[in-house]
Amino acid sequence: MFSLLPDVDLLIVYHCCQKSMEVSKQVLDLHFTLRTHFVPFFKDRCFDKKAELCAPLPTPTPEGYRVVYFRLADPDPRNFNLLEAVRTFMMVFDMWQYEEGTWPGFVILIDMEKATLGHVARLDLMVVKKVLYFLQLLSLIRPYLRKELMHLVNAHQTGAESIEKLIPQKALPKEAGGEYKDFDTLREELFKRLRANTVFLRDENRRRVNESLRPAGKPSPAEKEFGLQGSFKKLELD
């Protein structure tokens, strides 16, 4: 598997693991094992223009973290599909990091204007658990406690000054009260970027583990984390 990895992937993991070679090896194994077993998140990676808007913003936080803006495209809960939204996010995130390399960290900014209780009712809890676990891996690759996870989630009212501590209001899309590009422009530009990176996305889909090559008697990271039935062992949700 590792022979298929470009240098930029190895450098990103090495950077996130604070330059620990041993931890980097374990994280690479876990990372691609999860991508192998979380098939619905990564298969059929094509962008639908009707999908949720997932747009990397050019302005970083004061700490240098990069920000990705996420917003529902359709307010009708009957058309909401969390799995499709996650697939779109992962595709955009992979391309974005491939283009830019390492960051000090990243922030997911979710615009909840169109979200309703009807959307919450359509959430698949197993998909939510897998998303949270995978995001742990993406953000500094360390297992967060429940209390620490809660500290990573912050709510801001529309137009509130508190968001200025995260990112300048003017850096947001126009429809979100900022001075950046409008939603239609962002969606069209994102579509063009993804089409320009089809070779990268195709090659990424080939970077998967072959469990038959794992040493006999050695459980895979997926077995350690989820067990044979796919239940989480380390991530607890109240």
Image (cartoon, rainbow, N blue to C red):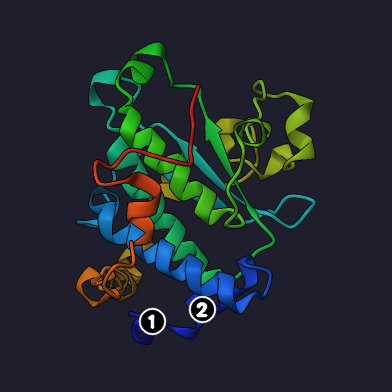
Q: Quadrant of residue 156?
A: top right
Identity of the residue furthest to the top in this view: 117
The image position of residue 87, as x and y in percent, is 32, 48
The image position of residue 121, as x and y in percent, is 33, 16
Q: In this orientation, which residue lies closer to the viewer: 41 or 169?
A: 41
Q: What residue did someone put label 2 on?
A: 10
Q: Given this view, does label 2 or label 1 mark the residue nearer the observer? A: 1
The image position of residue 86, as x and y in percent, is 36, 43
Q: In this orientation, which residue lies closer to the viewer: 66 or 8?
A: 8
Q: What residue did someone put label 1 on?
A: 2
Q: Which residue type carries mark 1?
A: Phe
Q: Callout 1: 10 Å neighbours few (<14), some, many (20+)? A: some
- Dot 2 and dot 1 residues touching (CB under 8 Å): yes
In the rendered structure, which disc, 2 or 1, sits on the residue that comes first in sequence? 1
The image position of residue 144, as x and y in percent, is 61, 43
Residue 93 lies, with reference to residue 70, above or below; the image says: below
Q: Is residue 67 visible?
A: yes
Q: Is residue 59 left or right of residue 173?
A: right
Q: In this orientation, which residue lies closer to the viewer: 133 or 156?
A: 133
